[in-house]
Amino acid sequence: LMRSVIAALRMTVFVLAGISAVSVCATILVVCADIFLRLPFINRPFTGAYDIVRIAGAITLAAALPYTTAVKGHVAIEFFFHKLGRKSRVVVDSGMRLLSIVMFAFIAWRSFLYGFDLYSNNQVSQTLKMPIFWVPMFIGFCCAVVALVIVHHLIYPNKEMIKP
């Protein structure tokens, strides 16, 4: 059972990384199209480019977090860590992981609440007028996945979930 849960979590992390990559490409395409369409001989700006880039940026960052966490790609303070003894390193690392789980679970919870609030108030984007409640919900989902990845790192401290 645990192997299938880890496999599902790993697959979710990979899918989110793919979504992040597609979102970066979408941002590039929209920005380039907007710049091209603003040239003097065309002079027809891309309507909604601001909304699309804003949403794509949020998706890019949120969807990249689980992968970055899974490969342990965050900045670590190695200098500080190497000054500590082995037991102290384990205690500090475990404490930081527990705090991180709490923090990301809290962010996920608050993001979902914010998304439900946007949904109940029928909030839409500025220029495209499309519903945006799903963006904080997506961010909340990604933060929940990050919390689960950190739980995996806490249970299996010396194992990488994904090799970069």
Image (tube, grey):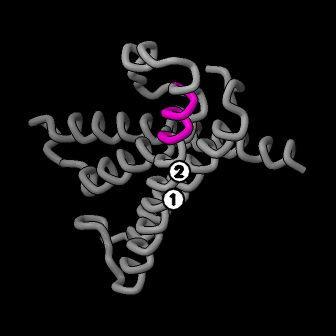
Question: Cβ–Cβ below 8 Å for labels 2 and 1?
Answer: yes
Is residue 14 in view?
no
In front of the other: 6 or 153: 153
Residue at image position (72%, 34%) is 156
Task: Please tell me how crowded label 2 is: few (under 14), some (14-19), or many (20+) other residues with Cα within 10 Å.
Answer: many
Extreme right residue here?
A: 1
- Over which residues does the magenta segment extend? 89-96
Left or right: residue 67 compared with residue 75: right
Extreme bottom residue here?
A: 120
Residue at image position (44%, 19%) is 81
Kind of residue indicated by mark 2: Ile
Q: Secondary structure at mark 1?
A: helix
Q: Badge 1 is on which residue?
A: 105
Q: Quadrant of the C terminus?
A: top right
Q: Is residue 18 magenta?
A: no
Dividing the picture into quadrants, the one containing residue 128 is bottom left
Kind of residue indicated by mark 1: Ala
Where is 4 relative to 89, above or below?
below
**Residue 41 at x, y percent in the picture:** 12, 36
The circle drawn on residue 101 is: 2
Q: Secondary structure at mark 2?
A: helix
Residue at image position (14%, 35%) is 39
